[in-house]
């Protein structure tokens, strides 16, 4: 039988204070105090004070354990997601119902929507479940991004059972976890990192200059049915003919792909994000690809199997020299072959880890990956008012990076975090540090930058043994101005 406990429970590398259920095989946290504060060490204590229950840390800081009061039901409100309506997490078909529509979970396990006046405007589940005081209901978004409603029978020693779920398609949520759907690239695209399907895709052909026609190289459109992705189109045409939509993209130098639904033709640029197969849509995706007229002579197309062909040629040459008895020449060929393979693997590792491709957004890291990269945030580089920067090494290539962890992100900090990803992530300039990736794991928000081996600007100006002359300082100021003009 499940029992409710109040006290400390394990959270990450520390402990949190809250209410949790015991007697259930799966640990279930009902409520957590001071959720915006980081976990505390095992030396923290709870104290009864005149102001209420307080949490005392090993560093001598005291925090009041705040209570949100008694609640008979729960509501999940809008979290200022940048997604537009058609790409919201869960489409509840409430357009036109007004503002402040809330999702509610009743004591009987009934999921429903209320408007600002408290009226029921839609049932998510088909009516309420049988009233039973011996059952608990839990509503949560799981690690794979699926929104689910669970029930648990207190009279039985069993795990939580699924009553309802928002989707059975793992490709719908936009998450980066160990539970990943199978990903594949669009036609004429290949994975940036063959060992990581989620690293994104890049073209396997070199794009010609716009309006540069050649007899040996042409463009065509390849079709994918029941395909959709995030709609960030720069132009939408009202067309009922698919051929007209195709021609409109082929004649547009900026068009890389189009979505055609029978009445509208929306033009898209790279990168194409959150793409997935959706059998519930009639959309047709059309991808612009380069096709050589003479594939054997055009070096701009990476032909399938070309790498294997090159390795086979080297092997044939080596066997030929062996037949002629030239052992020295055979050894030279083998050494050269191994050197080329090593160089290719090294280049693939660097390109795969850093994802230095203009058609791919900054990589999203899991929090556990950044813990390993920084050796559990061991080496601190600099500390600011709202963030701490640690030194880390990219797994595999061992290339140094700077990992910036935002502490106690408030509303302003949330805006700052989204701005850095949106602006700096797509800005490439020699006077700006490059954003390589980010982590968005609940309250944990981190950014991964290129590592500056010379330290910060303040170190150069004030703590360096040889401080720069005025001419060098003016050069630094001009370079900062150039970088700022790119961002603004």
Image: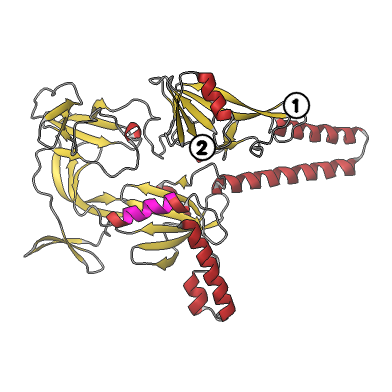
Residue 335 is labelled as none
Q: Which mark is on residue 269?
A: 2
| 416 w.r.t. 328: above or below | below
Dominant SS type (magenta): helix
Q: Is residue 417 magenta?
A: yes
**What residue does disc 1 label?**
294
Secondary structure of the residue carrying numbered label 2: loop
Location of the N terminus by quadrant is top left
Residue 47: image location, x then y, percent: 13, 62
How packed mark 1 is, by other alpha carbons closer than 10 Å (few <14, some 14-19, many 20 or more), is few
Please identify the residue farthest to the front as the structure is shown.
Answer: 238
Which contiguous range is marked in magenta?
413-422
- Image quadrant of residue 171? top left
| 167 w.r.t. 75: above or below | above
Residue shown at 32% from the left, 59% from the top: 407
Between residue 277 and residue 29, name the one nearer to us: 277
């Amino acid at each position: 039988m499940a029992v409710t406990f109040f006290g400390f429970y394990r959270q990450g590398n520390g402990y949190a204070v809250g209410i949790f259920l015991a007697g259930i095989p799966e640990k279930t946290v009902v409520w957590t105090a001071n959720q915006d504060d980081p976990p505390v060490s095992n030396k923290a204590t709870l104290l009864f004070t005149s102001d209420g229950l307080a949490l005392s840390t090993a560093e001598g800081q005291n925090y009041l354990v705040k209570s949100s009061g008694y609640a008979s039901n729960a509501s999940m409100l809008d979290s200022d997601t940048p997604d537009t309506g058609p790409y919201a997490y869960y489409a509840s078909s409430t357009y036109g119902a007004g503002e402040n529509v809330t999702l509610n979970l009743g004591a009987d396990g009934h999921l429903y929507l209320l408007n600002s006046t408290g009226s029921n405007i839609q049932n998510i589940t088909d009516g309420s479940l049988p009233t039973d005081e011996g059952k608990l209901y839990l509503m949560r978004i799981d690690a794979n991004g699926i929104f689910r409603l669970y029930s648990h029978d207190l009279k039985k020693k069993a795990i939580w059972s699924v009553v309802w779920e928002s989707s059975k398609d793992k490709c719908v949520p936009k998450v980066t976890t160990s539970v990943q759907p199978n990903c594949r690239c669009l036609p004429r695209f290949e994975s940036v990192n063959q060992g990581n399907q989620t690293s994104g895709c890049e073209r396997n052909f070199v794009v010609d200059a716009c309006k540069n026609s050649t007899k040996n190289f042409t463009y065509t459109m390849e079709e994918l049915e029941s395909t959709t992705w995030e709609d960030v189109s720069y132009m939408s045409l009202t067309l009922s003919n698919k051929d007209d939509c195709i021609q409109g993209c082929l004649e547009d130098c900026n068009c890389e792909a189009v979505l055609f639904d029978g009445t509208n033709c929306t033009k898209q640029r790279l990168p194409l994000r959150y793409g997935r197969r959706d059998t519930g849509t009639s959309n047709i995706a059309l991808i612009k690809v380069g096709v050589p007229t003479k594939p054997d002579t055009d070096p701009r197309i990476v032909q399938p199997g070309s790498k294997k062909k090159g390795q086979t040629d080297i092997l044939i040459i080596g066997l030929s020299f062996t037949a002629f008895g030239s052992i020295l020449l055979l050894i030279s060929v083998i050494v050269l072959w191994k050197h080329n393979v090593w160089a290719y693997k090294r280049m693939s590792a660097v390109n795969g880890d850093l994802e230095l491709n203009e058609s791919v957004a900054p990589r999203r890291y899991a929090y556990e990956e950044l813990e390993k990269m920084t050796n559990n945030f061991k080496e601190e580089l600099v500390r600011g008012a709202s963030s701490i920067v640690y030194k880390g090494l990219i797994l595999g290539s061992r290339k140094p990076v700077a990992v910036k962890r935002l502490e106690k992100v408030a509303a302003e900090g949330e805006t700052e975090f989204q701005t850095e990803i949106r602006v700096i992530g797509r800005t490439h300039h020699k006077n700006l540090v490059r954003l390589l990736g980010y982590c968005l794991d609940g309250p944990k928000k981190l950014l991964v930058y290129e590592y500056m081996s010379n330290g910060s600007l303040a170190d150069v100006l004030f703590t360096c043994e040889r401080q720069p002359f005025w001419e060098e300082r003016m050069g630094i100021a001009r370079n900062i101005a150039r970088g700022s003009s790119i961002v603004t």
